Image (cartoon, helix red, strand yellow):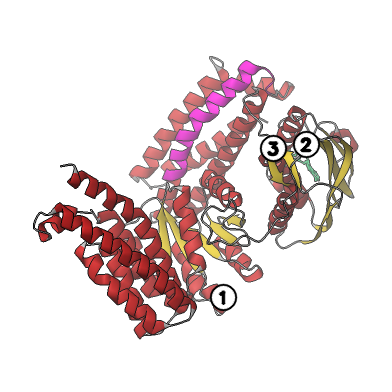
Amino acid sequence: MNTRELLTQLSRIENGLEQFSFEELSASEASNLKKTFLSFKNGLESKVFGERNAETLIALEDKQPKKPESLTESSLIANVSHEIRTPLNGIVGFIDLLKETQLSKEQQELVNALGLASNNLMSIINELLEFSKLSAGKESFAFIEFNLKNLLNELSYLAQTLIVDKNINFNLNIDKNIPEIIIGDPSKLSQILLNLLGNAVKFVEKGEINFNISLKSIKKNDIRLGFEISDTGIGIAQDKLGKIFDSYQQAEIDTHIKYGGSGLGLSIVKEIIEQLEGEITVSSTLGQGTTFKLEIPYQKTTQKVKRSKKINISQPNDSKPLADMTVLVFEDNLLNQKLITSRLQNWGCKTIVTDNGLYGLKILKDHKIDVVLMDLRMPSMNGFEITKRIRNSSNKSIKDITIIALSADFNASDKEQFNALGMNDFILKPFKPDNLLDKIVNSKNRKMTERETKTETMELISKNNLTEELNLELVLEDCMGQVELLDELLQLFKKNILEFVGKTKVHLLNDDFEGVAFTAHKIKSGLRMFKLNSLIEICDQMSLICKSDRDIKHLNFLYEEFLKEYEVIEPKIELEIQRIRTK
Ligand code: ADP
């Protein structure tokens, strides 16, 4: 494909746009969309074709499909891909805007077709970029210790989540002699295997996918691993087998129509494997199935193998703080999908991503999901609609699931819906990884039946976080300007906090609600003195719960929040007092 497929995609979009302007729809979005598209198209054409026109190129391409070979060519593609992603993002954004306007049924279909074409284009461009990076040798490979067994299990799990409405048995078989921890590039290995497993799932309707990993050789610290992915799918004709590793090659003319894809996946896979000094081969029988075999060299670690142990999420320095959790992510933007997935996987949790409301709801039924990350604005069913369906579910564990909203903006009406639907938390995009991690870890301690109170608490907490400015000058005024007195008060205050932290922990462990209410009450006067409103709010909530429903999980959550807040506040107090002392 390359140029040809790009052009096909472009003319699909163009056709859609033309039809648009012939309808009486004269919304400014439509004209903006068209303008953006045209400048994008012109820019792209002149970049790719130089002075020559598109028709001549199509004719040339017809005679001889090209693949990017030279460094200049691939860096050109890299530049072009970067440049066209930005306007393309704009186009996708405008299409979303159009979707939100009043459209006739026919117009809706056109907009959907536009959306589909631009999303296809986006994924082709992303793959192009990936390919060109590889060809230009820009890709650097990691050489780190990683847990192979965990990685293979995660990949198999992911592959199985891709099997929807198909009757496929997935079998994973790992040679027992393979060391658990090896040295190499885990993310490249994931990329290779996911591509192959993804293809297997795509091209198999029923039967089996077998994923076998064996130890091919071992010499001192050098090991060579064999990976075999075989399926009982549609297979590939013998005369096509030789070509499937070439860029933009698909086995049959109608493969793209039936299965989508760009024909780039396998060429990227081969390129990576070769750069890793490994090899890949394929054998296949049409109508019976396909087997991909690969061998990749790795190194054994010289350190003692650490058995993977269950990690307690309350330890802040865990490298896998979300191990044992499964997160379902509703997100339509591919880049965001990639970003979120790779972060979640780094934290050790299983991740399922979808942009489709109905599919996501099915996943919720079939899998044990701990947390849902919900993009609010998605093309077909938006985040609020999906949340509504979740909260109306007759299945209690689905209905009560923690939902964290993801959004680039959060306006008043969003907030209203957020509260009305009982979403548990929200995070603004772009977000810091630590922030997301905190929110997911917190969600573990939450009890869902307390959604509303908690939402309020969290809103208050985050509001205070934003607005609270520590002002010790006011306290100094209370101390009649005596810095020594302020110092003394501060030491006492810190002691009180330590007492609160220790005693409350013991009370919580013993389910002693009177005790918790008492410590929360006692600490409040100190907090008031220093006007630490967010901490006061948390203590108020704790007292309230001790008097009302005595929900221990909610109390634990608030206690953790208190600790986190205080961790941020204490250094600020220190800085303030030093400033005052040296004044
Ligand atoms: P894509 O899947 O995006 O089309 P790939 O480079 O991954 O591109 O694959 C190239 C072609 O090889 C596919 O279009 C398909 O025709 C064929 N192919 C790959 N894997 C399989 C498989 N497991 N079974 C049958 N055909 C396959």
Numbered disc 2: secondary structure: strand
What residue does disc 1 label? 397
Q: Nearer the viewer, residue 349 or 176?
A: 176
Q: Are marks 1 and 2 in contact (CB under 8 Å)?
A: no
Extent of the magenta region: 68-94
Quadrant containing the C terminus in the rendered view: top left
Numbered disc 3: secondary structure: loop
Look at 87% across and 37% down and name the residue there.
Answer: 218
What residue does disc 2 label? 299
Asked if the magenta segment contains residue 307, the reply would be no
Residue type (three-letter) at the residue carrying disc 1: Ser
Q: Earlier in the sequence, mark 3 or mark 1?
A: 3
Q: Earlier in the sequence, mark 3 or mark 2?
A: 3
The answer to whether residue 39 is above or below residue 505 is: above
Q: Which mark is residue 185?
A: 3
Look at 28% across and 75% down and name the residue there.
Answer: 522
Q: Position of residue 578 (x, y in %)?
A: 23, 46
- Quadrant of the rendered structure where residue 265 is? top right
Q: Earlier in the sequence, mark 1 or mark 2?
A: 2
Q: Nearer the viewer, residue 493 or 200?
A: 493
- The Cα atoms of the two marked residues, 3 and 1, are separated by 38 Å
How packed mark 2 is, by other alpha carbons closer than 10 Å (few <14, some 14-19, many 20 or more), is many
Q: Position of residue 59 (x, y in %)?
A: 67, 22
Numbered disc 1: secondary structure: helix
Residue type (three-letter) at the residue carrying disc 2: Gln
